Amino acid sequence: MRTVDAVIIGAGHNGLVAANLLADAGWDVLVWEATDSAGGAVRTAELSVPGFRHDLCSAFYPLGVASPVLRALDLESFGLAWRHAPAVLAHVLPDDRCALLSRDPAETAASVAAFDPRDAQVWLDEVDRWRRIGEPLLDAMLRPFPPVRATARLLRALGAAEALRFGRMTVQPVRDYGHERFHGAGARLLVAGNALHTDLGPEQAGSTIFGWLLAMLGQCVGFPVPVGGADQLIEALLRRLASRGGTVEYGRPVTRVLHARAVAVGVQDAHGERVRARRAVLADVSAPTLYEQLVGLPALPRALATDVHRFQWDHATIKMDWALSRPIPWTAAQARCAGTIHLGADLDGLTEYSTDLTRGRLPSHPFVLLGQMTTSDPSRSPAGTESVWAYTHVPHAMAGDISRMREQAQLMEEVIERRAPGFRASILGRHVQLPGDLQRHNPSLFQGAVNGGTAALHQQLLFRPVPGLARADTPIDRLYLASSSAHPGGGVHGAPGANAARAALARNGIAGPAYAGVIGALHRRLYG
């Protein structure tokens, strides 16, 4: 049996971030990846027509470029480069009006002012607030829980009175926030549409903070893409890890976490090979996979096993990629220069769409999120063409109905064609991923649930992935959850992997026995 300091289960971006941080500390790190390539939900391939590069899952990275975790890794020194579309995002309404989000605050203000002139200054006021608190807010959101220092910095930036009002805003439904803060549909939709990058509808508590965060990130850092494809982010992580002596092995599906007396000691793969981990096992897999399959519920406290059964996924997904002979011929001219497009719904339409999903009904008017990748990065397809993707959500209860899923995929094309007559005529090739296809590509994407679990308040902070400490530590000593199922959740920012690595380092530091004692005592109080 080989022996290393740490085994990382899964070479998704969180697993690779964790591996890099442990290797930086001088640990002997081995990553076992089940498939034949690294990346998880961050991959690129020619799916439709040769010469057209498509990102298989995630594509735009506002959190990635802003994340203090990824910034600290200096991936640009390992070949990562970013590109931006001329405009960040366009929300195209059913009447063909368009709200545009630009990295130029004045341009965004002018766009929302077209819906109501009073919103120009209100939008600029929001941008000013972000510039004051954005850095400590991201630190507070992405650092290990509880983020004492970052929260103190955030409170100093806000002041007591504004902190109370900002706290209220973070838990508001985005419909209420939009009506309180803005006067016209444009600004309201820029925030509400971004909230639906999660599984939270306009009436759900907590939707404001997600929509506001993405809107302000788009305003200030854009929605950049890696030059050449999303996989270039992974390639940079791999090159950095190799330079530190870390190893990644492929075709190694882990089937079991080895543990004795509630301490993780290694892993076993599907071929029966075992590796001993002297210091830690970190799992970049979903929480249900880790606890139900790799550890086994009988090894867990009964209360924790019950909580794992209650884990809630975000919505299932249908994703389509197209190779087009020309850029999309939007009738809303502003949409032609944006990297990300929201279409198919005004605010009431977003509510209808979200309500359908909540009730387990297939939306008859789907909200479609679309990416114009060649507009964002010309290397993605031949000159004069466009590489495009789009996705929409569907209820889990219907995700296995292949016929209905294919009909919904056709409906997505109809939504685009209505706003861009001639779109279908420009299609050179298409590639459709139904919910089951997304899960086969990446087992952590249960029926295409792309955020590692619901973003609803009942599964955030101390409730993610289950009621507990909001930390990577598990009740199995030296075993850490490093995926988006853990706090702070979905998005390509590397925080779950970094938090797991920091927990492992703390457990193995000078104060390691005391750390283990405190964490263990808290887990016993929580789970018995």
Image (tube, helix red, strand yellow):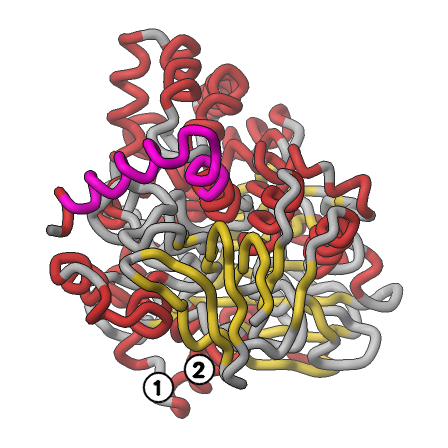
Residue 348 seen in this snapshot: no
Does 520 appear in magenta?
A: yes
Q: Residue at x 75, y 44 (%)?
A: 82
Q: Which residue is mark 2?
A: 436
Task: Report the amino acid beneath label 1.
Answer: Gly
Residue 103: name its quadrant: top right
- Relative vertical location of residue 457 with respect to residue 228 in this rendering, above or below: above
In the foreground, 37 or 127: 37
The percent coordinates of residue 270 (x first, y second) are: 50, 83
The numbered dot on residue 69 is: none
Task: Report the amino acid beneath label 2.
Answer: Gly
The percent coordinates of residue 152 (x first, y second) are: 38, 14
Mark 2 touches mark 1? (CB < 8 Å): yes
- Which badge, 2 or 1, is on the more N-terminal residue? 1
Disc 2, SS: helix
Q: Which residue is mark 1?
A: 400
Q: Which stretch is magenta? A: 504-524
Does 214 appear in magenta?
A: no
- Relative vertical location of residue 472 with respect to residue 274 in this rendering, above or below: above
The percent coordinates of residue 113 (x first, y second) are: 51, 29
In the foreground, 500 or 508: 508
